[in-house]
């Protein structure tokens, strides 16, 4: 009994012996834990002990937040920097910048997720292709993805874009933002944790009109 | 056979299908009027004219509809005229009626029709008498099961289409231009309540279907007495099984969609405004990203005003561990290479001697070139002796000689004069021609 830790109750549990190390490593690798697939057990552990010292543990020893968030009535957990800084994850190789192409794709997936409010969030390549080639902003998409707007693209150009999308999806899967069903067919499910991109860019999204005006004025002057 | 059908269809397709909007609407109007009792099965020309006018008015085409052409087109497959006394009466063909019924069902499915449980109950009753022997069962299969398949599938498809259509309409709820969204949600909630009732029907359907299937499966033992009976039964049972499995999948998928949409509708009330606003902002952000980002040499780059964001991320480091399969690992000493040391030394000596010759040749060529550049004439036989004496190797002066000739071939300002006067070199039993080299300045 004297070895028991009253501040971090979770450390006394048998479940911690089983799951804490895995949950900790997974979270530190940037993954968003949710009640889905193989992560269900880790999610359940974090969910049970979040208020029983787990949240405090990260704040005390790493000076980072273990965040509990919800989207579409589903909970998910992730590590985030506090307003005061990056804590112990501030050192080199303990954080990463979200690449530009991934920001655009994450916002696209978030938008699709919201569009499919009443439906399952499973996406196939044909749906993405329809956005790139037939949507209102098809020209902008093609300019970004292919580098130019053409009537037809060569199979190599098409394949390059598909490979690029596959690469992004693989990285998103590591973050827990999507669950890939078939990488060859580019079939995947968007997870509720895609909401994180909205949290990362909440200041921009909240002031989108001002930002648009600022950029437009900048381009004019 | 299939080819004949295709040929026949390609010849007649313009007659067998209504070719324009007015033909289609006219047929459906006539069908509905007959069904609702406003027209007799056999109607008069005047009724037809009135209906054409109604369609023209609806389409706002006025006199643009060519009555004669229209009637001529429809007369082959859709309506027939016959004389009764001094009157001409027209009736719609069975083909026209069936087509109209299908079209109406397709565009305006009635939710009440989707009660699959009743469809199954009505079309698929399996009495004890049907199970008595293989003939009875076969009769049930041909006369009840096979026709029922069509009805069940049709009902399932209609329900699926209706639900998908409603779900697409639901997306509008998140759009900014929706007026009075609460009222709209109310109306959708009503629709989805009806659909939820259908779900209960679906569950009953699955139970009823399982009951039927179990009854059939229980017959297996009974019909396994002779091979012929069993083969016939087995074939029918497989077909029934396959059909029910495909219905199962469809019903589960429909049920999932209804449940999900109903659940979301309930949650939408409180948060509608916030969700609408947030969704619009995300769309705007995406559009801004698309408009302001650029592709530079295949790399997508955001506009400088959009800040980069950091996320906690400790990469996993993989350490490459040698993959050793100990089952195949040999414990013996590594095999040593065997080689002939004296041969190696000889080869080395040869190599060094060759190198020495090349080096000396190059040095002598340099010396001769320097001499030539100072304007002197080179009498090669003198140099030959000098080189041979110094190097004590005949190969060197010979190589120098070849080197000079090669050099001469490349340079335009060097002249080689060869007098074919033999000079005997007694020492080496060698005879040379007299060769002079001189640099010319033009």
Image: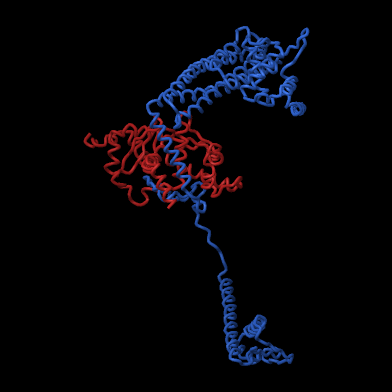
Q: Drawn colour of chain B?
A: blue
Q: Where is residue B205 in the image (x, y as percent from the top left)?
A: 53, 16
Image quarter of the N terminus of chain A: top left
The answer to whether residue B210 is visible is: no
Q: Which residue is drawn at 33% across and 31% down?
A: A48
Q: Where is residue B47 in the image (x, y as percent from the top left)?
A: 68, 14
Please name whichever residue, A136 or B106, is drawn nearer the observer in this view of the structure: A136
Quadrant of residue B56 within the rendered picture: top right
Please name whichever residue, A130 or B50, is drawn nearer the observer in this view of the structure: B50
Please name whichever residue, B142 or A76, is drawn nearer the observer in this view of the structure: A76
Q: Compared to B268, does B345 lie above or below?
A: below
Judged left or right of residue B150, residue B298 is left
The answer to whether residue B138 is visible is: yes
Judged left or right of residue A158, residue B283 is left
**Chain ID for red:** A
Please name whichever residue, B42 or B109, is drawn nearer the observer in this view of the structure: B42
Quadrant of residue A36 within the rendered picture: top left
Q: Compared to A100, does B339 lie above or below?
A: below
Q: Position of residue A67 (x, y in %)?
A: 33, 38
Q: Compared to A138, does B270 lie above or below?
A: above
Residue at the left extreme, as displayed = A2
Q: Where is residue A122 in the image (x, y as percent from the top left)?
A: 50, 33
């Amino acid at each position: 009994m004297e070895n028991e830790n009253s501040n971090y109750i979770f450390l006394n549990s048998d479940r911690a012996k089983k799951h804490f190390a895995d949950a900790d490593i997974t979270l530190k690798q940037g993954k968003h834990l949710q009640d889905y697939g193989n992560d269900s057990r880790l999610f359940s552990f974090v969910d049970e002990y979040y208020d029983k010292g787990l949240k405090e543990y990260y704040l005390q020893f790493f000076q980072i937040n273990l965040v509990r968030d919800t989207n579409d009535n589903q909970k998910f957990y992730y590590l985030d920097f506090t307003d005061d800084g990056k804590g112990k994850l501030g050192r080199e190789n303990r954080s990463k910048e979200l690449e530009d192409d991934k920001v655009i794709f994450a916002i696209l997936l978030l938008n699709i997720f919201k569009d499919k409010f009443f439906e399952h969030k499973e996406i196939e390549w044909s749906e993405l292709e329809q956005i790139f080639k037939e949507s209102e902003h098809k020209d902008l998409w093609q300019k970004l993805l292919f580098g130019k707007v053409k009537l037809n693209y060569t199979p190599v150009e098409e394949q390059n874009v598909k490979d690029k999308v596959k690469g992004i999806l693989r990285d998103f899967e590591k973050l827990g933002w999507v669950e890939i069903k078939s990488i060859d067919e580019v079939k995947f499910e968007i997870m509720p944790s895609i909401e994180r991109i909205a949290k990362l860019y909440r200041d921009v999204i909240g002031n989108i009109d001002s930002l648009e005006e600022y950029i437009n004025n900048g381009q004019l002057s | 056979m299939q080819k004949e059908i295709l040929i026949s269809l390609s010849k007649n397709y313009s007659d067998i299908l209504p070719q324009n909007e007015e033909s289609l609407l006219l047929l459906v109007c006539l069908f509905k009027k007959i069904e609702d009792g406003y027209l007799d099965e056999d109607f008069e020309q005047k009724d037809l004219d009135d209906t054409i006018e109604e369609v023209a008015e609806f389409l706002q085409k006025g006199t643009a509809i060519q009555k004669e052409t229209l009637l001529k087109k429809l007369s082959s497959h859709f309506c027939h005229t016959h004389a009764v006394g001094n009157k001409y009466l027209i009736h719609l063909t069975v083909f026209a009626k069936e087509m109209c019924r299908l079209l109406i069902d397709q565009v305006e499915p009635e939710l009440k029709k989707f009660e699959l449980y009743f469809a199954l109950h009505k079309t698929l009753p399996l009495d004890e008498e049907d199970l008595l022997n293989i003939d009875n069962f076969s009769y049930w299969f041909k006369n009840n099961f096979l026709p029922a398949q069509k009805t069940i599938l049709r009902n399932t498809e209609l329900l699926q289409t209706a639900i998908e259509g409603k779900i697409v309409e639901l997306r509008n709820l998140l759009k900014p231009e929706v007026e009075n969204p609460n009222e709209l949600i109310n109306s959708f909630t009503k629709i989805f309540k009806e659909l939820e009732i259908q779900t209960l029907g679906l569950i009953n359907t699955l139970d009823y279907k399982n009951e039927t299937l179990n009854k059939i499966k229980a017959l297996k033992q009974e019909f396994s007495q002779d091979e012929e009976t069993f083969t016939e039964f087995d074939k029918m049972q497989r077909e029934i099984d396959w059909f029910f499995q495909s219905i199962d999948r469809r019903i589960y998928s429909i049920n999932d969609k209804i449940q999900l949409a109903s659940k979301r509708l309930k949650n939408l009330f409180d948060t509608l405004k916030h969700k609408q606003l947030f969704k619009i902002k995300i769309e705007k952000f995406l559009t801004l990203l698309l408009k302001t980002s650029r592709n530079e040499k295949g790399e997508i780059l955001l506009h400088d005003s959009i800040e980069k964001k950091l996320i906690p991320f400790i990469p996993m480091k993989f350490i490459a561990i040698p993959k050793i399969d100990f089952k195949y690992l040999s414990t013996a000493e590594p095999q040593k290479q065997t080689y002939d040391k004296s041969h190696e030394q000889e080869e080395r000596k040869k190599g060094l001697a060759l190198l020495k010759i090349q080096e000396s040749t190059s040095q002598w060529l340099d010396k001769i070139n320097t001499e030539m550049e100072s304007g002197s004439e080179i009498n090669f036989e003198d140099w030959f002796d000098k080189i041979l004496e110094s190097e004590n190797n005949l190969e060197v002066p010979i190589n120098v000689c070849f080197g000079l000739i090669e050099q001469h071939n490349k340079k335009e300002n060097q002249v080689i004069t060869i007098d074919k006067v033999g000079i005997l070199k007694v020492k080496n039993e060698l005879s040379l021609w007299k060769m002079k080299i001189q640099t010319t300045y033009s």
